[in-house]
Structures are given as structure tokens and as C-alpha cells.
Amino acid sequence: MTLEEALAEPRRELVASGEEKDGKRMVSIYSLATGGAREVATSLVSVEEHDALVASLRARGCEEAETEFLTRIIWVPNAAGLEVFDRRKKQLDVAGDRATLEDGRVIARSDLASVFAWASDDYAHRGIMGVLRSGEEVELVTEISLAATGDPSYNRNDLLMDSGWCTTLGRLIASWAGTTFENKI
């Protein structure tokens, strides 16, 4: 689907841009029609055209989102906080002084003592955890990587490349909570 075709569909839409490479940037439109962020269109544009295209997409109703293109995690910063999605669902909604987890549990910002990024020993499960003032650890955002489970040559370097989003998003969440962030990956 082209960017134009994606904009014609009735749904909440997000636009995210990739890093510059060889004078070009990837621009993707994601749909939130199913509750998760599903990529519906992608285009490779020159760096010179990028900002004008994103401004045009925003003027036409797309919210600006962020992602790292080695993950399926998408986050939407807004004035009240941020929303975090994977392909199937909203994982986290941070708004004002509360964070709502995937299962509906609400955590007060003041209850969050620290935030850290983590990965399982087999590298397949990774994400961001919050430590509450009570000492309880809660999953805030997680991802399971099939690459890590299906590729016998998958190693720590691959994990570090694939989990960069954990640091970026973890720092945003910690900043919102006014607490510390630690990368334990």
C-alpha cells in the first residue's frame, strides 16, 4: 500500500521515520485500527524531502510516533505522557500521574521507584521493567524475538542491536516518572 492509500483508510494513524542511510530515510505509516500498531505503508524518501513529507502527513491527521526499525514496538509521545504499542495491542499508556499496564492495572507515577531494561538468558524475551516502592517488579513493555530463538548464531551483539529501543523507551518512561533508569541488558 502506498502512503496515499494508507491515508485514505478510516483509522487512527501514526507516522514514524527511520535513521538516515545513504541520503535516504524510511517513513512508515502505522494503523491503530486493531488496537495494535500495524505497519500499513512504507516509503524510502530522500533526506531533503523527509521533513516536508512528515509535515504533510501530520497536517493530514497522522500523529508522529517513534520506533527503532529492529523492533515492533511503537511509541507515541504526547503532552500527557506516551502510549506504547506492539502489533497486537497497547502495552502501556502513560498519562499525567498514572501508567496503565496492558492488563489494565494502574500504577501511580509516585509508586515507580526505578526503571530498567532487561533480557532473558536466551535473549528472546526483552523489555522494560518498573520497580515499585514496595519492591515489586512489573513488566511495563516486552517483546519476544523469534530471531533470537530460531537462529543458532544469534549472539549478544545481535541482542544489543535489536534491543536499543529498550534503552530509548526506558529512559523516556523513567524521565516521566522522575526516577532512575538502568540498562541491565
Image (tube, rainbow, N blue to C red):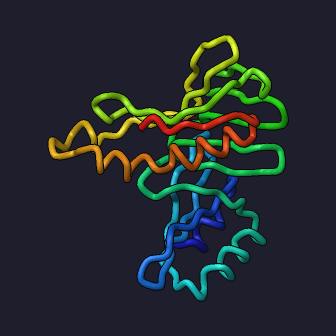
Residue for point 64% across, 57% down:
65
In depth, the one of 94 and 170 nearer the eye is 170
In depth, the one of 40 and 73 nearer the eye is 73
Q: Where is residue 126 drawn, in percent x and y?
A: 42, 35
Query: Which residue is situated farthest in the left direction here?
Result: 152
Q: Quadrant of residue 34?
A: top right
Query: Which residue is situated farthest in the bottom direction here?
Result: 48
Q: Where is residue 30 drawn, in percent x and y?
A: 58, 56
Q: Where is residue 50 drawn, in percent x and y?
A: 60, 80
Tell whether 101 sits left or right of 154.
right
Tell whether 55 sits left or right of 140.
right
> In the figure, 8 relative to 157: above or below?
below
Residue for point 57% across, 50% down:
168
Q: In the rendered picture of this protein, how many numbered marks are placed on residues? A: 0
Q: Is residue 63 visible?
A: yes
In depth, the one of 96 and 137 nearer the eye is 137
